[in-house]
Amino acid sequence: MPKLLEPSANWSVALQDEFAKNQFNPCVGTRLLSQDSRVRVWEVRLKPSERLPFHRHVLDYVWVATTPGKARSHQQDGSVVEVAYMAGQTSHLTYGPGEFKVHDLENIGDNEFVFTTVEFLNSANPPLPLTAETALEPQRT
């Protein structure tokens, strides 16, 4: 198993605890919409003040913001990033062998914020396993 990461001492105790608990969480969305031998398709749907808990990206993926919104993300290096998204905004991310990102996502805007994320299972890293529970239950805090 990869080395455990240490949460930022600048975060609240609750965030530090969640980071420690979820740093290998494979659920990169609030709901898994579809999965086949090539892709996992996730929906991220967050009402104002809702959060997607800490999770780990190891696969190449693309996301598309389907609504405009504003989000805050706590990153594995301790930084906190705030970003405004436009509807239709898209990003493609790639991870080499052993590379990953751990972060959370909080809707800090006034409207529901919706993303679609597609993970490519044929990436440099093996996919993190999903359990029946994590694949079916909405992931929010």
Image (cartoon, helix red, strand yellow):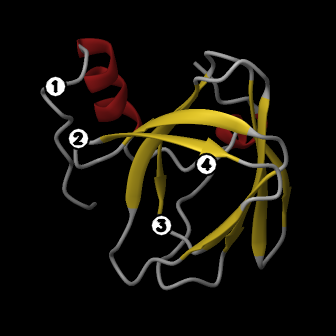
Q: Amino acid at mark 2?
A: Gly
Mark toward the start of the polypeptide (3 vs 2):
3
Q: Which residue is mark 2?
A: 78
Find numbered disc 2 in the image and state the secondary structure of the residue it sits on: loop
Which quadrant of the figure has residue 23?
top left
Mark toward the start of the polypeptide (2 vs 1):
1
Which quadrant of the figure has residue 95?
bottom left
**Which mark, residue 89?**
none
Which quadrant of the figure has residue 29?
top right
**Which mark, residue 10?**
1
Q: Which residue is mark 4?
A: 28
Mark toward the start of the polypeptide (4 vs 3):
4
Find numbered disc 3 in the image and state the secondary structure of the residue it sits on: loop
Question: Could you give the CA–CA distance between mark 3 and mark 2, rounded to whole angstroms?
Answer: 19 Å
Question: Could you give the CA–CA distance between mark 1 and mark 3, rounded to whole angstroms?
Answer: 25 Å
Mark toward the start of the polypeptide (1 vs 3):
1
Question: Could you give the CA–CA distance between mark 2 and mark 1, rounded to whole angstroms?
Answer: 8 Å
**Which mark, residue 58?**
3
Find numbered disc 4 in the image and state the secondary structure of the residue it sits on: loop
Question: Could you give the CA–CA distance between mark 4 and mark 1, rounded to whole angstroms?
Answer: 24 Å
Disc 3 and disc 2 in contact, CB within 8 angstroms: no
Q: Amino acid at mark 4?
A: Val
